[in-house]
Amino acid sequence: LLSNSLGSTVCDPASGLPAGFMKTFAREILPNLVSFCVPVFGVIAALVDLCFIFSSDRRRLVDKVCETVVVAD
């Protein structure tokens, strides 16, 4: 459902199928909306989110919350 020019797709890890509209919306739009509405919290949340890529499964915080995974096409 969501594919980008980098050759990756956002998927549901349980089924392996592309993530649906709601998961994709939550993953892409809600963090940006929070950052816009609450700037200080948004900056801190963005930094924490980025730190999660160094975890063993290399998933961002937003991927864990939305139960998504990014896979190469």
Image (tube, rainbow, N blue to C red):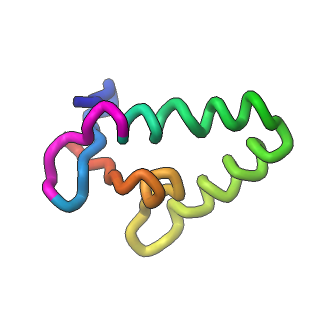
Name the dominant secondary structure of the magenta segment: loop
Residue 41 lies, in percent from the top left, at 80, 46
Q: Residue furthest bottom?
A: 56
Q: Quadrant of residue 9?
A: top left
Image: 58 above or below 32: below
What quarter of the picture does the C terminus occupy?
A: top left
Q: Residue furthest front?
A: 22
Residue 58 lies, in percent from the top left, at 43, 63
Image: 52 above or below 5: below
Tell me the residue at 52%/30% (across/down): 29
Q: Quadrant of residue 14?
A: bottom left
Image: 45 above or below 23: below
Q: Residue furthest top?
A: 5
Tell me the residue at 60%/39% (across/down): 31
Q: Report how many numbered discs are placed on residues in the image.
A: 0
Q: Residue furthest right?
A: 40
Tell me the residue at 62%/32% (across/down): 32
Residue 60 lies, in percent from the top left, at 49, 56
Within the magenta stretch, is there residue 6?
no
What quarter of the picture does the N terminus occupy?
A: top left
- Residue 53 appears left or right of 1: right
- Residue 3 appears left or right of 45: left
- State which region is magenta: 15-22
Tell me the residue at 48%/34% (across/down): 28
